[in-house]
Amino acid sequence: MSLYGVRVLLAALMLTGVAAALAAGGADGAAASRVPRPQLTVDRGTQCVEPPERMRLIHPDLLRHQRDRTVRDGERGAKASLNACVQCHAGKPGSPAPGTVAGHPQAFCESCHAYAAVRLDCFECHQARVGAAGGAR
Amino acid sequence: MSPRESAAGEDRGVSRRAVLAFGGAALAGTLLAPGIRLIEIAGAQVARPAGEPASGKVRWGMLIDTTRCVPDCDKCVQACNTENGLSGGRAPTDPQWIRKIEIRLERTGRTVYAPVMCQHCAQPPCVDVCPTGASFKRADGIVLVDRHTCIGCRYCMMACPYKARSFVHEPLHDQKADVPRGKGCVESCTMCVHRIDKGLTPACVQACPEGVFVFGDLNDPGSAIARRVREIASSQIRPDLALDTAVRYHGI
């Protein structure tokens, strides 16, 4: 196929996609968001290190500040800890993402990060599951 | 004071410290979970309290007695792999934080086996060359990579005379909760920093059935390692580089 042919095909595909998206948006109605709002359920019954509305805003700062103090200075057992986040916020058994905070569209961290379109890098290195015993490959 | 008296005084001081240390160890033995043997407690200290940074007064080190290291054993290597979630593969791109080497003197035919890992230099060349400051030495002498800052340029791998560092080439899954690792970063032996901070000894030290390793605080004159390096001949690998490594070898 010539280059021109490829371009025409791509353009046709894109148009089809846009049309499909518009149709879906119209069906949902104007009030509904294109991306479903995250449904966060935290039923541990305990208090987080800060009130929830504050945590929504500052959890990256808390973690970023603490990670340097832990890695560089060797401080352990601090208030803000990624492992502690996972311990409390991992999905309960029977939930859509049991035992994890990432790796599933409805997992605690991932659902919000997908909604806000903020890339979630933590769990490329850190363990997102509770009680993970497996070795990395 | 005559030299003899001074030596006796030192002896008394050491023994008092030893008694204190033993008292601390006994106390820790009662406080810590069952299953932790006294020898581990004697090797490491109790866990640092929460929020307390690593102390600059401490210098963690290891003495490796190569005369005890036997040929067909790689328990230290396996323990390291298990503890840190390493694959244990032997491909050139697989991570290797500790390796067991065989040294044979051709002239005499004497063969020595020794585990070699990051030597946790006091003057680490990897830290000197790191362009982002990701490679650093903690206050207690442990040389680490801050993966949050590492850009994976691998200068440190070039600079290390011990070939101690590895690069993570592929995306990883199922890392250990205490040992975060990821693609695009350089990594090496951390002296099991997560275990040391809990008051445990490194995994390789704990796993060795031959008692090759002595782990402890080189700066504490009463510690087992300080006593041992005072008593027996030990050397650093490539002492000519004047890096002042924290890992010392006996019998090479």
Image (cartoon, coloured by chain):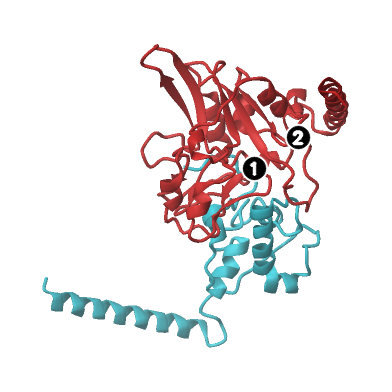
Chain colours: A cyan, B red
Amino acid identity at mark 2: Asp
Location of residue B214 in the rendering, given as x and y in whole percent from the top left corner: 65, 26
Which residue is depicted at the point 79% across and 50% down?
B50
Task: Indicate which label's residue lies in the foreground, 2 or 1.
Answer: 2
Q: Is residue B3 left or right of residue B177?
A: right
Q: Which residue in the structure is indicated by mark 2?
A: B220
Extreme residue toward the bottom, this view: A30
Which of these two is toward me, B136 or B11?
Answer: B11
Which residue is depicted at the point 54% across and 41% down?
B243
Location of residue B129 in the rendering, given as x and y in whole percent from the top left corner: 47, 54
Q: Which residue in the structure is indicated by mark 1?
A: B193
Location of residue A89 in the rendering, given as x and y in whole percent from the top left corner: 68, 58
Q: Work out whether B66 lies above or below A28.
A: above
Extreme residue toward the left, this view: A2
Q: Is residue B212 left or right of residue A1?
A: right
- Disc 2: which chain? B
Location of residue B120 in the rendering, given as x and y in whole percent from the top left corner: 57, 40
